[in-house]
Amino acid sequence: MLAVGATASTAARARTLSIFFLRGEQLASVPRTGSGTTVAVRKLIAGPTRAEVRKDFRTYIPSGTPIHSVAVTGGLATVDLGARFISGGNSDDLLARLAQLVRTTSAAGAPRLQLLIDGAKVAGIFPRVPTERPITFALLQTPDVPLPKPRREKEPPPDPRVKRVQQRLIPLGYLPTGSDDGRLGPATQEAILAFQKWERLSRTGVVDASTQSRLNTAQRPTPVTRGNVGKRAEVLIDRQVALLIRDNRVFSAIAVSTGKPSTPTPPGNYKVYAKIAKWWSVPFREWLPWAVPFVGGIAFHEFGLVPTYPASHGCVRQPVAVARMTYDFAEIGMPVKVVARS
């Protein structure tokens, strides 16, 4: 017969730890049974489960990273890992794996971390993070670079040919009303690229012969799926286009860059859960202005580099010219459907 005291003891041992992986541009926790910093580090190194990977939880820590030792004294965790922890990957990968470790050990009860690699302190490995001394998660949460300012490029003088193109893009939903100024600025360039993506033309951003020909006969984009009355959005991964939709009519079609193959934007049905004008990515130490997150750390957001192909950590990157428009259009609770093949 099991004594009451034994039952209480078993429950005490079966404590839950928070282990931190990534979903898009932010850290996200998953529960694990156990207690103590040593166990937490082991669970972190083991990585997400298959079910968690299917829900887009990712780890940037190399599989098989050796754990030499973990010691905790007075809130300071000294974690000694093998060199595999700092091998391979780019600067983003290194920052992400460090953030995972710092946040996990902090949640386990050690707010400061001293990282050792093969028994020695390291410096200059993690961009802008001084790991030769103990660090805290608060350090990673604190922006250390200014919010990026959009580059102001001198626009060319008005051109009647550009104005004619704009006057076609406006009723098609690629440019807002009143933007036909005849200048080939960032908004018009983005609109041309979005048109080419939607029409499955070459993604040149230039009004070449095939683009001009299609402009003459094109129809306004239509939603891929049917939805309720009100606002919603579709992210079309194959076309690298997002559609902002009001009452089942496309309000605007924009060019985006979704998650690269190693960190894809997960298809599915989601809802906007926040609007954050100045979002800071803790793992990647970068600003994500005009963020509209809809699942974990995956969001629409402004980014300086928006290539014509999937290149993000899972988010939906948008050019500066349109990110604020998406932010203003979005509402908390707005449905977002990510479609793999449109």
Image (cartoon, helix red, strand yellow):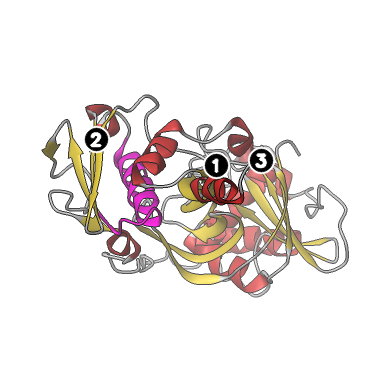
Position of the C terminus by quadrant: top right
List the residue tagged with mark 3. 239
Give how far across and how far down residue 28 sits, in percent: 51, 52
Res 65 quadrant in image:
top left
Kindly identify the residue that appears in the image at 40 percent across and 43 percent down.
40
Q: Which residue is mark 1?
A: 57
Residue 72's label in the rendered image is: none
Q: Are marks 3 and 1 in contact (CB under 8 Å)?
A: no
Residue 296, image x, y percentages: 57, 54
Residue 206 visible in image = no
Cα distance in 3D space between marks 2 and 3: 48 Å
Q: In the rendered structure, which amino acid carries the disc numbered 3?
A: Arg
Magenta stretch bounds: 90-112
Looking at the rendered structure, the kind of residue marked 1 is: Phe
Q: Nearer the viewer, residue 174 or 165?
A: 174
Up-down relation of residue 211 to residue 142 (above or below)? above
Q: Nearer the viewer, residue 188 or 312?
A: 312
Task: Tell me where residue 310 appears, x and y as whole percent.
Answer: 53, 39
Secondary structure of the residue carrying numbered label 2: strand
- As drawn, the label of residue 69 is 2
